[in-house]
Image (cartoon, rainbow, N blue to C red):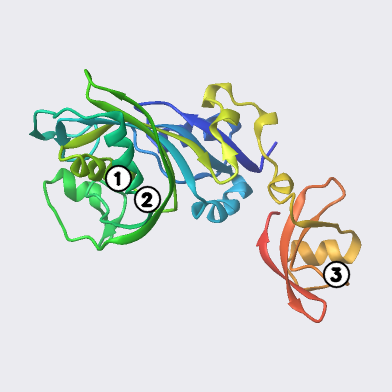
Amino acid sequence: MKYNGLVLLDKKKGKSTTWEEYGLKKLFEAKKVGHAGTLDPFATGLIICGINKGTKLLNALEGEDKTYIAKLKLGIKTDSADITGEVIEKKEVSEHTEEEIKSVLETFQGELEQVPPMFSALKQNGVPLYKLAREKKVVERKSRNVTIYNIQFISYDREEATIVFLVDVSKGTYIRTLGEDIAVALNEVGTLIDLRRTKVGKYNVKNAKKVEDTRVEDIIDISEFYKDVFHVRITGENDKRARNAADLKLDLDKDEVLLIDKDEKAVALYKNCGRGWFKAVKEFV
């Protein structure tokens, strides 16, 4: 049986996002599996994967806000800005109070500019930056505007010189870069030693599972994904037209409608073009 929809995975530490995808593809014998938002191998937490036709939902998730819990180690700086990289600087850590750290964290809330790290999947002339970084090459990167909606102090371990914080961010925010910047604001150097993504949009890691624990009933059906969109059950000629992505005449005052078949499975997402005509924007058959 061919399954279509989304799966919430809790990524393992030390595994790549692609590795998790492969496990899901093998588990459900899927022809196609994709994901929204890559996690670094050292990170854990929520990955949203699409299976077969469910991959068509992923674009809608790419721009969603995300929540992370990060652990920042003061006193060392690595070339990758995380614990997997090569240590390029060490510095004795000064005394800090929780109040001081909280005050510094607050300065990062709001809109700010970030320069993407060399160890990232961004491409330069078609080549991912991380490949250039592994060759010890550094290229100029343009800064981008990102938003820190909320940043919350969790704990500070003076002996270990580690800060744990929670952060809600916009698309494109690099938490590794944020960690380095926080260290600099404390007049320190630092690198992330742990990172966990807990939320992507409305989806929470609490509802995610490891690949090996995932079952068919854990697949979020396409119709469920569009539960807030008006559903229209189609039959006969309209069903045939929808399966060929043809324009439809519908007497509905809705901006978007999800067309479903007699089994309540998604056929296509249609957009209102005016005068009662609806045009297909996504097909699921």
- Type of amino acid under label 2: Thr
Crowding around mark 2 (Cα neighbors within 10 Å: few <14, some 14 to 19, many 20+) is many
User: Which numbered disc flags the more N-terminal residue, 3 or 2?
Assistant: 2
61 vs 151: above or below: below
Judge by depth and name the residue closer to the eye, 284 or 96.
Answer: 96
Q: Return the residue nearer the eye: 91 or 193.
A: 91
Residue that numbered label 2 is attached to: 173
Q: As displayed, is residue 106 above or below residue 92?
A: below
Tell me if mark 1 has few (under 14), some (14-19) or many (20+) residues whose alpha carbon lies within 10 angstroms of its own. many
Distance CA(mark 3)–CA(mark 2) = 40 Å
Give the residue pinned by disc 3: 252
- Which mark identifies residue 178? 1
Q: Amino acid at mark 1?
A: Leu
Report the side of 75 relative to 37 (left or right).
Answer: left
Do the residues bearing badges 2 and 1 touch, measured as CB atoms within 8 Å? Answer: yes
Most extreme residue toward the bottom is: 275
Distance (Cα) linking label 1 and label 3: 47 Å
x and y, in percent, of residue 93 in the image? 13, 28
Query: Mark 1 or mark 3: which comes first in sequence?
Result: 1
Q: Quadrant of the N terminus?
A: top right
Q: In which quadrant will I find the C terminus?
A: bottom right
- Choose top left, top right, bottom left or bottom right for residue 83: top left
